[in-house]
Amino acid sequence: MIDNIFNLCNTISKEMTSKNYTNAYNEFVNMLNLIISFRDQEMNGKVYSDDDIAIVLLNLKGFDLCDYNKAIEPIKIHLFTLGEFAKKLKTEIILQYADRYNTLFWDVMTDTQNILSAYEYVIALGKYKQLVGKFKACGGSIPTEPQIRVANIGRNPNINLFDRRTMINSVFWLEQHPDIKDLPFRDLRPHAAILIRQALEIMWRDAIGYCRIKNQNGDTLKQFTQIGWKFINQYRTKDKDTCKAVGTQNLWSITTPVPIKTFEMLNNWCNNFTHDPWIYSIHVQWFVTEQLWRVTQRNYSANRIQSGWSATILE
C-alpha cells in the first residue's frame, strides 16, 4: 500500500504541474483514503489519546529511527495522527477550490512520504534484528540490513527573513490580493503557533486574575508576561500543600480540561517556533491547532460562559 501512495504522489505532482487541478484533487482524495486504510491496518484498533500524542509530537528532541525499541511507538503515533489528519482533510477540502490547494497538497505529500518511509524502515528494522538473532543462534544466510526509502518530494523547512517580509506584506495588504491561491501559504500556516502561544498566555493570566503588572511609574513590567506559566509549573512540580495564597493558609486548586503537562508542552512548542521558525510536518501543525480548541473548551454555569479551566482558592 505504501508503494501505491508513493505512486499517487507522483501522479498528483504531474497533474498539479500541468495545472490539471480537478484531476489532482481527485487523486489527492484517493491518496487520503489509502493513508487512512493503511493507518487503520497498522494500528489494528489501537487508539492514542491527545495527551499520548502530545508527548511525542510536541517533543522538541525527536527520536532516533535507528533505535527500534525507542522509535517504534513514536513513529506509530505519527502514523496514527497522519491518519486522523487525512480524515479531517477529507471533510475540509472542496473541489471548487482545487486550484488553491497547491501548497497544501505538496506539504501533505512531503510529510506523508517522510512518515511512511520512516515507519516502513522501523518495522523492517525490527524484523531484521529478529533475523540477526536467529542467524547468531542457528546460522544460515546473513540477513540484509534494511534501507530507508528515499522520498521524491520535499520542501525547504526554513523560514528566512525574506519569507517573513513577503508574508507580513501579504497579510497586511490582504485585500489587495487578486487571487487567494497566490498567498504564501507555506509561510502563513505555521505562524498559527505564535497566535496559539499568545492565546495560552492570555488564558493563564485570566485564570490567575490579572491583566498586567506595572511598576511605580505606571510602566508595564514585560518580564511578567510568562508569570502564569511559572505559577502553573510551581503548582505541578511542587507539593500542592505549599501552594498557598500569600499571607493565608488557603490552598490553590487548579482545574484544567487537559493535564498541565500537555499545556506546558504545547506552550513550549509554540514558544520554540516563535524564536526558531521551522516548518514542522503539517500533521503536527494541525494537531497543535486542534489542541487550542481542546484547551479552551467552554462550560456553561450560572448563565455565564466560562472556560473549561479555573484557578481558585480553597477557603
Image: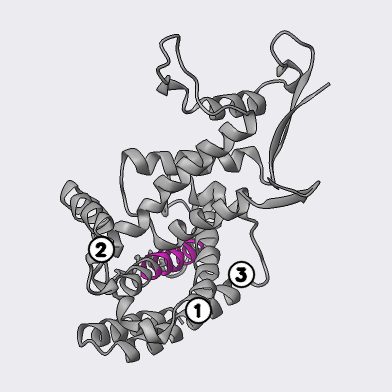
**Along the line of sight, the residue nearer the viewer: 14 or 231:** 231
- Amino acid type at mark 2: Pro
CA–CA distance in space, label 2 to label 1: 22 Å
Quadrant of residue 169 in the image?
Answer: bottom left
- Amino acid type at mark 1: Lys
SS at mark 2 in the image: loop
Residue 125 image offset from top left, x and y in percent: 45, 62
Name the residue: 35% across, 41% down. Answer: 274
User: Which is more foreground, mark 2 or mark 1?
Assistant: 2
Residue 131 belongs to the span the image colors magenta = yes
User: Which is more foreground, mark 1 or mark 3?
Assistant: 1
Residue identified by numbered label 3: 43
Residue 219 image offset from top left, x and y in percent: 40, 17
Drawn side of residue 174 relative to residue 121, left or right: left
Residue 256 belongs to the span the image colors magenta = no
How crowded pointer 2 is (Cα within 10 Å; few <14, some 14-19, many 20+) is rated as some
Q: How many marks?
A: 3
Residue identified by numbered label 2: 184
Magenta residues, start to end: 112-133
Drawn side of residue 230 relative to residue 125, left or right: right
**Along the line of sight, the residue nearer the viewer: 98 or 137:** 98
Label 2 vs 1, first from the N-terminus: 1
- Amino acid type at mark 3: Met
Question: Is 60 placed above or below 241 here?
Answer: below
Residue identified by numbered label 1: 90
Question: Is 256 placed above or below 156 here?
Answer: above
Label 1 vs 3, first from the N-terminus: 3
User: Which is more foreground, mark 2 or mark 3?
Assistant: 2
Determine the main secondary structure of the stretch shown in magenta: helix
How crowded pointer 1 is (Cα within 10 Å; few <14, some 14-19, many 20+) is rated as some
